[in-house]
Image (spheres, rainbow, N blue to C red):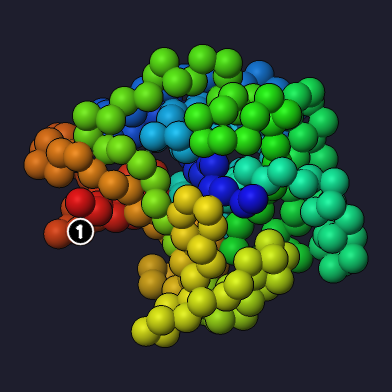
Amino acid sequence: MLRLRQICLVAPELNKSVAHLESVLGLKTCFHDPGVERFGLKNALLPIGTNFIEIVAPFQDGTTAERYLQRRNGPGGYMVIMQCDDVERRKQRMKDLGVRLVTVIENEPHHAIQMHPKDTGGAIMETGLDKRGSDPASPWTPAGDDWKNFVATEIVSSLTAAELQSDDPEKLASRWSEVLEVPLQQKDKIYSLQLENASLRFTQNKDGRGEGLRALDIAVNDRNELIRRARIIGCDIDESSVHINGIYFNLLS
């Protein structure tokens, strides 16, 4: 089992970015994880259906997140976090593939590994599990114990895909396919990996910001209201997407 569970965005200022996601997408913050402070970060988790958008912001100098903000010239996508049921096996596979682990999380009942982005490309990749359950509505330690009480679906209902851009999307997609053990698919020059509940899409560098997480596909319940809210705070908008915190949110009916 391999399921998209959480997308992490990075921002220079936490409260502003959280406020924009809440106001435009109608999401609600369910948790602030004190555990990320050891990385010099503050965060917020917002459920979108049974998945989560996390925003992190550095409060100390010299953090990996701060360097990422500098390298990509502003806020944007930072991590792709997936739920699995075999962390230990995947840990051994990373060793066999020569993929370094930047973090091993053993915070009962949550176990996870984070792979070094220089060995995978695209973004920081994480796979993990919560021993209390593996179905989509099961507990998820990084989001707190009562995240389901904060699910709001008036404006948007789910996260269905993440898009990573690269100067060589085929190479990046092939590497993620190898690391995650998910078959590589290709259609109309677009490479993708199909997870249990969402897809990972790999495209040509479109915005000149370099390799990284560029866009998220979200299922929308009230497009007109979303667009109205986005205009109020001055988001860039086109026919099919809104731009918030350096990420294009593609609006799907």
The answer to whether one can see residue 36 in this image is no
Give the camera-side residue of 164 and 167.
164
x, y percent for residue 129: 70, 37
Image height check: is 100 above or below 230? Answer: below
User: Which residue shows up at 14% across the image and 59% down it?
Assistant: 239
Q: Position of residue 99 (x, y in %)?
A: 82, 62
Using the rendered view, name the quadrant where residue 42 is placed.
top right
Residue position marked by numbered label 1 in the rendering:
240
Disc tally is: 1
* For residue 25, above or below residue 150: below
217 sits to left or right of 7: left
Of 29 and 48, nearer the camera is 48
| Observer-nearest of 192 and 121 | 192
Question: Local crowd at mark 1 within 10 Å, few (<14), some, or many (≥20)?
Answer: few
Residue 32, percent from left and from top: 55, 20
Q: Residue at x 80, y 54 (%)?
A: 90
Residue at disc 1, secondary structure: loop
Q: Amino acid at mark 1?
A: Ser
> Which residue corresponds to the image point at 15% horizontal and 39% vertical from the top-left?
222
Q: Residue furthest bottom?
A: 189
* Point 57% across, 75% down: residue: 184
Q: Is residue 81 visible?
A: yes
106 shown above or below 3? above
Rendered location of residue 2, percent (x, y): 62, 51
